[in-house]
Amino acid sequence: MTTTVSSKLPPLYHRFFPDFIENEIPAETIATCDDCVFCRQPQNPFINTKCCTYYPQMSNYLIGGLLQDTGWTEGKKRMRALIKSRKGVTPYGLIRPKGYDLLDKELRTLHPTDTGWTQMEVEALRCPFYDKGQCTVWAYREHCCSTHFCFSVGGKKGKQFWSLLNDYLILVEKELSKYALYQLGWDADKLLLEKPDCRNIVIDNPLGEINEEQYAALWGVWAGREEQLYAACYEIISQLDLDTFERIMGVNHQIYLAKLTHSKTQFQVPDIPEFLIYNRKIETETTKEGDIRYLSSDTYVVVSPLIHKLVEKFDGTRTYHSLSSLFIPFGIDFQKDYLLMLYLNNILIQKDA
Ligand code: SF4
Ligand code: SF4
């Protein structure tokens, strides 16, 4: 199953990558976000957030695009409330408010992987645009929200492709948001060359209180007219032609496109060997809900005890087709995608590997 790159990028960008977006890539049939892997068990602490425990750094022109759109009512309402609060609201777009940034760092130090989180901790980091499983700003989502997949059917190569695209979108957002401000007459002396964040722009404190003086200095004549600034930025970026875009991005555009095109050719779903063995070197633990968690080197996979029993039966003497059929009477349809996930995470390995 395949999809096109265009389906993964906000429409605003489509004309900047006319050929590249037509490329076919494997569909991420395991990280199916509408039917999120985190939401398949009611006791999962991420049940009310999915992986949207993240503060999106939407650029000025993406915010402007959202606010002028005739749809996305809930997202616009939330964005306007955020602009009113002024927390993390900058001319470049949204940055993490200081309080969120500190909490995020603290919790991720405490839990370096997705394990061990309480539901309360997870929900403290929920994105302000997340609404009952849906993204309320999807058509104007930023780099990470476009390219993050908790699992790639292409394994490491798939992850590399998404990571490269993410890096390029970060650069695009940084350059275009700055370009829009410059076109609006922003003082070049005041424009940041690096990616804006709560370390190089300080407008609120950990308690969420706004520093009035710094906020006024940052926004200048646009203070109080934030929405108009975002609309003006969108106006500029939405009318950019391809030549101007390429001129703004400079040589980076050609380099990234070449790298992405190469990476795409390596992004393929591997064939699963017919004869597989359960890799007993993989550490396992039993979760407090009684499920089995395999701890592979860079991620973990949780399965029910019944599936674990099936996994243990992989000893290289029978094909995966015949083993899978053993479990059909128990109501378990051991789909190929599932097998792929176990294979790519080294939980099932090729016989004689
Ligand atoms: S990427 Fe996020 S939303 Fe998509 S399936 Fe994975 S955890 Fe769920
Ligand atoms: S902007 Fe949308 S996709 Fe991104 S973290 Fe928020 S809810 Fe999730």
Image (cartoon, rainbow, N blue to C red):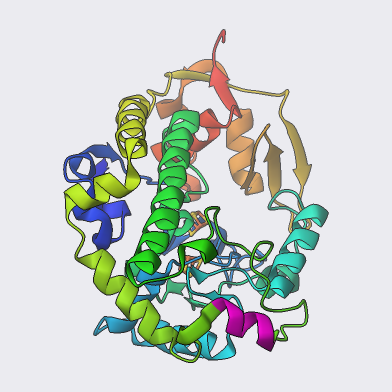
Q: Quadrant of the N terminus?
A: top left
Vertical order, 293 against 40 (above or below): above
> Residue reaching furthest top?
352
Vertical order, 282 against 82 (above or below): above
Does the magenta run of residues contain 213? yes
Q: Is residue 264 left or right of residue 344?
A: left
Q: Residue at x 59, y 33 (%)?
A: 311
Of 113 and 103, which appears nearest the observer? 103
**Residue 82 percent coordinates (x, y):** 53, 85
Q: Residue at x 77, y 56 (%)?
A: 116
Can you tell which quarter of the image residue 111 is in? bottom right
**Residue 252 percent coordinates (x, y):** 37, 37
Vertical order, 194 against 189 (above or below): above
Q: Is residue 134 left or right of residue 126?
A: left
Q: Is residue 341 left or right of residue 233?
A: right
**Residue 261 percent coordinates (x, y):** 29, 30
Can you tell which quarter of the image residue 259 is in? top left
Of 27 and 243, which appears nearest the observer? 243
Q: Residue at x 43, y 19 (%)?
A: 273
Magenta stretch, main secondary structure class: helix
Count of numbered circles on the image: 0
Does the magenta run of residues contain 16? no
Of 203 and 28, which appears nearest the observer? 203
**Residue 192 percent coordinates (x, y):** 54, 59
Is residue 326 visible to the viewer in this orientation of the structure? no
Q: Quadrant of the C terminus?
A: top right
Q: Which residues are magenta?
A: 212-218
